[in-house]
Amino acid sequence: MTDSMQYDYFGAYGGRYVGETLRPALDRLAAEFEEAWSDPLFHRELLKIRTTWIGRPTPLLFAENATRALGGARIYVKMEGLAHTGAHKINNAVGQALLAKRMGKRKVIAETGAGQHGLASAAAAAKFGMGCRVYMGEIDMARQRPNVFAMEMMGTEVTAVKSGARTLKDAINAALREWASAFPDTHYIIGSALGPSPFPEIARRFQSVVGDETRAQMREIGGEISALIACVGGGSNAIGFFSPFIGESRPRLIGVEAGGRGTGPGDNAVRMSGHAARVGVAHGYKSRFLMDNDGQLLPSHSISAGLDYPGVGPQLASLGESGRIEFVSAGDGEALAALRFFARHEGVMFALESAHAGAAAMRLAPTMKSSESIVVNMSGRGDKDLFITAKALDRDNWIGFLRREVDNG
Ligand SMILES: *Cc1c(COP(=O)(O)O)cnc(C)c1O
């Protein structure tokens, strides 16, 4: 609650690159958010829904077997994937839905790629009795049928976006466009720490619960943290996890991007740890993007849909440039190996996104002393990825299962 206002720019990045119609909506949102944030009643409501519905605090696991197998630093896992709907996305969705309700909005809209943010928004809207529409690229809808089904179960209308490449970046554009005409009674819950100001700051504050809990849980066991590791798509789980430590010189903060299937254009989503990204403007903010000379966003790839975004949140871009946050990448194969490793040794299945952070921890731990500790944020659990991981790791059995399901259906 003592956060200073960090609106507009984070170093050279951020800002508000939108048409005139959206400016009043963003100004009003910024003012209402600050008012809510300084109201103890708002925090009481937030705490209640976090404890009774999201399932907070999420546990901090000492990954003792993994630590022994790797040799080196002690590895802890923040089990954010145990939050309701399976990932950290719910922290932001619930916070913003609560804010929308306080602002008198009757409806929320959201964009989604793989469906995790759409699912979190759909659940929050159902819980708070609000209408919900989720914009989703037509291609993503076809690929992510289970999440479309779950959102519709919760009363959300999922709208297919048929423009551009028909994926996440087009869904964000569609949602921003819709919001510009509907904001008097509608709030747009953006799914990561990005977009026009004040969205990156709002997402950071609602996600900072992850870092705050981690700090308190490590204090309780008397451990000092040497390094925090989180995967980076748009950057919301990372910025929330790192948030309480940003103003201090320690611990090391490490963001892990999707190295995908290689270093070629279109094969990864490396925006910070390589040289392919350029400074530009998209989705209402300035940051580092995979884009061409004309400012068109380029295709990107990751085995994990949540890391497959061509930009990165403005605060992370700034902290990467200042050196406070180190960026590395892990490829599709490394993520699958990490998924397997933590499943075997800890009985925990990471989401594919989070497995990238796990892979970086596996590289780092053996180079560190046994007196040091690493905390990995498991931003999501792996159930949602079954259709991808089972196909990658147990292909014949899985395809056989799907065939029989179709034949018997
Ligand atoms: C969406 C998602 C991510 C990536 O989003 P960030 O905003 O970078 O956190 C990471 N992990 C999981 C499980 C996700 O669902």
Image (spheres, rainbow, N blue to C red):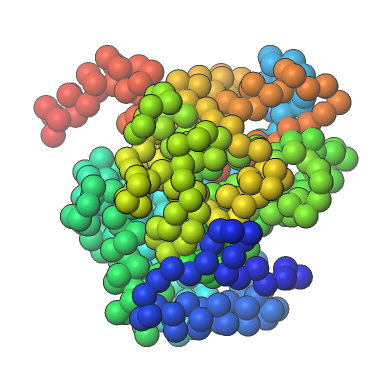
Q: Quadrant location of the C terminus?
A: top left
Residue 310 visible at all? yes
Residue 94 visible at all? no
Q: Residue at x 81, y 50 (%)?
A: 248
Residue 211 vs residue 78, the one in the foreground: 211
- 2 over 282 or under it: above or below: below
Residue 191 vs residue 271, the one in the foreground: 271
Q: Residue at x 69, y 24 (%)?
A: 364
Total labels drawn: 0
Q: Residue at x 81, y 43 (%)?
A: 250
Residue 41: x and y in percent read 66, 80
Q: Residue furthest front?
A: 293
Query: Which of the 4 image quarters holds residue 60?
Result: top right
- In-image side of 183 versus 142 (left or right): right
Residue 66: x and y in percent read 67, 21
Residue 356: x and y in percent read 53, 31
